[in-house]
Amino acid sequence: MDKKRRNMEIPMTNQEIIDAFHRLYYDKKHHSPILNSTRWHCIVLQKCPLDLHSYQEIMYEVKPKLVVETGTLHGGSALWLSHMMSLLHGDRKSTRLNSSH
C-alpha cells in the first residue's frame, strides 16, 4: 500500500491484506520474529499456525494412512505431523524426505 492511499484512509483490498500478511510473516528482509518462533516440542517449525490448523482439519477428514513431508528444515513440522497422525488416527505413519546439496 502506498503512502498516498494510507494518508487518504482508503481501505486495503483483500489482495493487499494477503500480500501484507505474507510480507510480514515470511519475508526475511522484515526479520519476522513469528516465522522462526513457531515451535513444536521446542523444535523450530517454519509453518504458519493457520496452516497447521488447516492441515489438522484435513488429516481428520481424510484419515490418511501415510503423510510424506519433503524439504524439511529442522524437523519440527515432521514431528508435528507425526504427533497429529498418532493423536488423530492411532497407528498411522508419517515420514520426511530431505535432500542434501
Image (cartoon, helix red, strand yellow):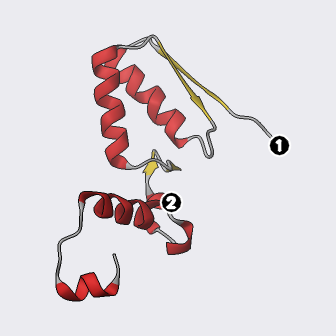
Element under disc 1: loop
Confirm or deny contact between disc 2 and disc 1 (CB under 8 A): no
- Mark 1 packing: few (<14 Cα in 10 Å), some, or many (20+)? few
Task: Please count the marks in the image.
Answer: 2
Taking depth in this image into account, of 81 and 28 the one nearest to the observer is 28
Residue 44, image x and y in percent? 52, 51
Q: Residue at 55% x, 73% y: name it.
A: 29
Foreground label between 2 and 1: 1
Left/right of residue 43 with respect to residue 9 in the rendered view: right
Tell me the distance, in whole angstroms, between the alpha carbons under discs 2 and 1: 23 Å
Q: Residue at 43% x, 29% y: name it.
A: 83
Task: Identify the amino acid type marked 2.
Answer: Asn
Left/right of residue 3 with respect to residue 85 in the rendered view: left
Left/right of residue 26 with respect to residue 5 in the rendered view: right
Label of residue 101 in the image: 1
The quadrant the C terminus occupies is top right
Which of the 4 image quadrants contains residue 4? bottom left
The quadrant the N terminus occupies is bottom left
- Mark 2 packing: few (<14 Cα in 10 Å), some, or many (20+)? some
Residue 41, image x and y in percent? 46, 44
Q: Is residue 20 above or below residue 101?
A: below
Q: Residue furthest right?
A: 101
Give the residue at mark 2. Answer: 36
Residue 3, image x and y in percent? 32, 86
Q: Residue at 31% x, 64% y: name it.
A: 16
